[in-house]
Image (cartoon, helix red, strand yellow):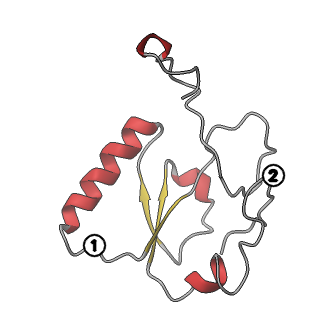
Amino acid sequence: MCPYEPKHIEGNTNLMSETYGAASELGKKTLIVCALEVETQGQLDDYEVLYTGVGKVNATYEMTKFLESWGSEFPFDLVINYGTAGSRKIKKKTLVDCTKFIQRDMDVTGLGFMRGE
């Protein structure tokens, strides 16, 4: 199990209930997707973990290869993206239920999108 308790800023604050989150997911086969081994700190040895390398491009490439290797027989019920997600505001070693995502490393304002979209 993850050594950190969730800290919720917004969104669902009922992650540990019987009908949502960890309690209802215990019987499912889970795949953890993470950039680097150092991020898991040996805490996820009970799960199958896919290490993708840093960044969205590496994560997308490695996850696509992994999905293709299974074809239509993907054996996992749940996939969890586990990692730092590059936050500058949230204290290290904090588990967060992400409810909003911002593309802060891209600028496509020239294509008509708002900064961060």
82 vs 93, left or right, is left
Between 111 and 106, the one nearer to me in the picture: 111
Question: Which residue is disc 1 drawn over?
Answer: 74
Question: Which residue is disc 2 drawn over?
Answer: 9
Q: Residue at x 57, y 85 (%)?
A: 26
The amino acid on which the numbered mark 2 sits, given as a three-letter code, is: Ile
First in sequence: mark 1 or mark 2? 2
The amino acid on which the numbered mark 1 sits, given as a three-letter code, is: Phe
Q: Residues within 10 Å of mark 2 (few under 14, many from 20)?
A: few
Against 14, is 87 above or below?
Answer: above
Secondary structure type for disc 2: loop
Separation of marks 1 and 2 at Cα, in angstroms? 33 Å
Where is residue 55 shown, x and y percent of the image?
Answer: 47, 36
Secondary structure type for disc 1: loop
Where is residue 88 shown, x and y percent of the image?
Answer: 74, 33
Q: Residues within 10 Å of mark 1 (few under 14, many from 20)?
A: few
Residue most extreme to the front? 112
Where is residue 95 shown, x and y percent of the image?
Answer: 73, 58
Where is residue 79 shown, x and y percent of the image?
Answer: 46, 66
Against 76, is 98 above or below?
Answer: above
62 vs 23, left or right, is left
Q: Residue at x 79, y 36 (%)?
A: 89
Q: Residue at x 49, y 48 (%)?
A: 35
Residue most extreme to the top? 110
